[in-house]
Amino acid sequence: MSLPEKVCVTAVVDNYLDVFEPSTSLVERAVPGKLKGHLLAGHGLAYLVDISQGESTFCLLMDTGNAFETLKHNMEVMGRTPAEVDALFLSHGHPDHYGGLLGFLEWRGTPLPIYCHPDVFWPKYLMTPRGKVGPWKLEREKIEDIGAQLTCATDAQQLREGVFLTGEIPRRTDFEGPMPGAKIIKDGQDMDDPLVDEQALVVNLGEKGLVIISGCSHPGIVNTIQYAQEITGNSRIYAVIGGLHLAQVGEEVLTQTINGIKDCGAQLALTGHCTGFRPHIRMSQELGSTFAISCVGSTATLAA
Ligand SMILES: [Fe+2]
Ligand SMILES: [Fe+2]
């Protein structure tokens, strides 16, 4: 099998919905009147990633949003079915990414391969200025009972030719730090959560470059980009897509992050979910036409 020729990334759950955002050469926006109903914005993230490779197509559902109702509703409005999904990739163990998983497996009704890091199953919570939020726990037995065929790995893996999960992402930049207040309960011990369970999906389109799809980017999007280059051996970046979790960072970190995205040469930075309003404004100003906001119903089409 050769490298993929095309990848289409459709936002099924995202915090943002704006029907007035214009389509671009790489991002097609949903036209409400042409859909079967009204799309819903919702906290969290879920992407349908359709990969074309020779005669075959492969549909990966990346994350499931915070609430199954939003995922199901938007998939139905877009005319998508759970049977189309070949495998599911869970980016990390936060409930705004796995919240719809149990419902999705029940809705689908047949077994489904699921890829994730083993740490996604530890209870997690947040210590915030407004107090403790959580804990939440993804119940491994429950999802296995209703059809999850789990592959849990800490290292990078290739799902098929040119389609990678990064596994644990090394923290190498000096400006991308841990998430303040993130906690994990491991073997009954509460500790700071290093969020090593977050991994990104990377599709290698050869000379066009890499399509990097990241859930929350807790390891830092620049670390993620650099590691994607390392594991694929391809230094070109075509698109950076996902949540960047920058709402709480200072201006200097934001500047370095945006410079990192600029310097990687991506033709598209399509970000949403947890990126943050202020970071989006700066990205819009500093990345120009490369930047687009990820909205529910948008499809990015990246072709080799
Ligand atoms: Fe998130
Ligand atoms: Fe997260």
Image (spheres, rainbow, N blue to C red):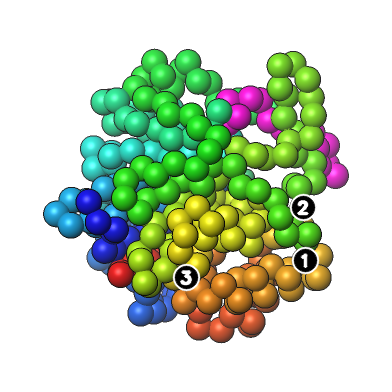
Q: Give the number of callouts.
A: 3
Which of the two labelled residues, at mark 2 and mark 3, occupies the earlier sequence position? Answer: 2
Task: Give the vertical position of 198 relative to 143 (above or below).
Answer: below
The residue beneath circle 3 is 236
The residue beneath circle 1 is 253
Q: Residue at position x 36%, y 72% from top?
A: 207
Q: Say what secondary structure mark 3 lies in.
A: loop
The residue beneath circle 2 is 177
Q: Amino acid at mark 1?
A: Val
For the residue pair 92 and 53, the one nearer the viewer reads as 53
Q: Residue at position x 58%, y 31% from top?
A: 120
Seen in the image, is 161 located left or right of residue 13?
left
Seen in the image, is 253 located left or right of residue 51?
right
Q: Taking the image as drawn, is residue 40 in sight?
A: no
Q: Residue at position x 30%, y 69% from top?
A: 303
Q: Amino acid at mark 2?
A: Gly
Residue at the front extreme of this rendering: 233
Q: Is residue 46 rendered magenta in the image?
A: no
Mark linked to residue 191? none
Q: Amino acid at mark 3?
A: Arg
Is disc 2 in contact with disc 1, using a CB cutoff of under 8 Å? yes
Residue 4: give x, y in percent of width and height: 28, 59
The residues tagged by marks 1 and 3 sit, at their Cα atoms, a distance apart of 24 Å
Q: Which residues are magenta?
A: 119-134
